[in-house]
Image (spheres, rainbow, N blue to C red):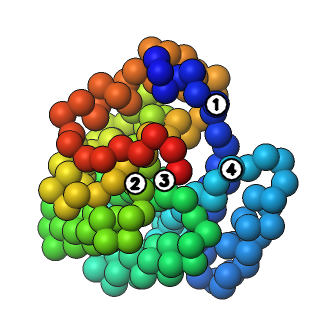
Amino acid sequence: KQWYQRRVRGGLECELIDSFGNECIDLAINKSNINGIDYLIIGHHFYNNGRHVFEYMPNMEQAKHWIKTLKKAWITKKFSYLAHPDGFFNSLDFNLNDVGNYLLEEITSFSRKEKMPLGINQNGIINSRKKYPSLIFWKKAEENKSIGIYELDAHTKENFKEKNIEKIFNFMKGIKIKILDEL
């Protein structure tokens, strides 16, 4: 309830697409100066082959490229956090093979080292995706002392209903990571 009484802030989720070079980042930076956008957010929905992270598990080469692109964006210091970092767990064929473990370790340890908040996505919680949010991911984030931030990822007014906001807090009750109140 205390969280809900705060001002809701808006972020522009930016996709990282190599073929555009820095164009996506530059466009996001320019757009963030208008319309009251408070944050730039790393969205990073796609692997370098154009496939969506929620669709399938990448091979190791694609996973390494995804991590490299993420790190490249974060070091610009233009972004405030990584949205839905556990999105790849929603893929139909996710498993904890070498690639899955690599992604878990790289994302959560980079979060700790670089103080990159990881977005705990409320929209995924209220839409009841089968494997999302991922308890395995957030336990690894806890182990690696990552930091998190609650994100509404509001697609509809349903996201703002108190019963739906409570769901994100309930999910994180058993996870002991530092949760930022503000960016």
In the picture of the structure, the residue carrying the numbered disc 4 is: 38
Q: Give residue 64's position: percent from left, percent from top.
A: 35, 81
Q: Quadrant of residue 17?
A: bottom right
Q: Which residue is found at the position 74% from the left and 75% from the top? A: 26
| Marks 3 and 4 in Cβ contact (< 8 Å) | no
Label pair 1/4, CB-CB below 8 angstroms = no
In the structure shown, which secondary structural element does the residue marked by tag 3 occupy? Answer: loop
Q: Residues within 10 Å of mark 3 (few under 14, many from 20)?
A: many
Badges 4 and 2: C-beta atoms under 8 Å apart?
no
Foreground tag (2 vs 1): 1
Residue beneath the point at 61% across and 69% down? 78
Which residue lies under the disc numbered 1? Answer: 7
**Marks 2 and 1, how far apart in space?**
20 Å
Q: Disc 3 versus disc 4: distance between alpha carbons?
A: 15 Å
Disc 1 on helix, strand or loop? loop
Q: Are marks 1 and 3 in contact (CB under 8 Å)?
A: no
Q: Residue 83, which numbered label?
A: 3
The tag earlier along the polypeptide, 3 or 4, is: 4
Judge depth for marks 2 and 3 and give the one in front: 2
